Image (spheres, rainbow, N blue to C red):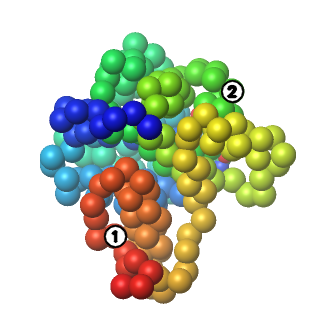
Amino acid sequence: MNPPAGAQGSRRLVVGVTGASGMLYARELFAYLAGRPDLEVHAVASEAGEQVLRHELDLSLRDLAGRRAVLYRVEDIGAAIASGSFLSRGMVILPCTRVSLGAIAQGQSRNLVHRAAEVTLKEKRPLILGVRETPLSLIHLRNLLAAAEAGATIFPLMPAFYHHPQTLTDLARHLVGRILDHLGLEHDLGKRWGE
Ligand SMILES: Cc1cc2nc3c(=O)[nH]c(=O)nc-3n(C[C@H](O)[C@H](O)[C@H](O)COP(=O)(O)O)c2cc1C
């Protein structure tokens, strides 16, 4: 991983939302970020991402991310986050489809979600992929391996139960907390083992 991105970069987080099931996780990530006015959130949703978000939560990316976030159009490949010169702490794609996973793993950036992820990898910044599909085919498994070999952290949306979640929100928060751990962001989302 690259050395810390400097004061400006470490304040920024890029978030991609693609069309997999699991928008509850995205909701909890953005809820956390809403409580962190010290962070700049730069977000982009794929077309399918917006569609599934509407289907699962009846919300748009703007509803989820709030007014403070900088949002980009997925076709805007000239956006700031498409360039490696745009400093950031890293990128999270939550949820991440096997389509976007494949595009990233194969270096075929067909939209701004893929391009921002590609840039994150080439600049050796943390890239977290909250992949969801089941079961996984050999193609998916190979793409997961290729993405991991290129430096991405694979965060399959597999909830844990050892912390005794009482609600779906508890369940989602626990996983989002683990993602935040990987980004070096302090949080109190869920109990840790041994606490
Ligand atoms: C309600 C709904 C749920 C879906 N869930 C998943 C999923 O969990 N994983 C997945 O890979 N694709 C899922 N899809 C299909 C993707 O949205 C679709 O393949 C899309 O083209 C992915 O494009 P994107 O990666 O640009 O978002 C779902 C589609 C719908 C409508």
- Quarter assignment of residue 27: bottom left
Can I make out residue 27 in this image? Answer: no
* Sequence-wise first label, 2 or 1: 2
Q: Identify the secondary structure beneath mark 2.
A: loop
Label 2: how many residues lie within 10 Å, few (<14), some (14-19) or many (20+)?
A: few
Residue 136 coordinates in the image, percent (x, y): 77, 53
Q: Residue at x 61, y 34 (%)?
A: 150
Residue 191 coordinates in the image, percent (x, y): 38, 79
Q: Quadrant of the N terminus?
A: top left
Question: Quick check: 180 left or right of 103?
Answer: left
Q: Amino acid at mark 2?
A: Gln
Q: Is residue 130 above or below residue 109?
A: below
Residue on which the image places disc 2? 106
Q: Residue furthest left?
A: 37
Residue on which the image places disc 1? 189
- Quarter assignment of residue 21: bottom right
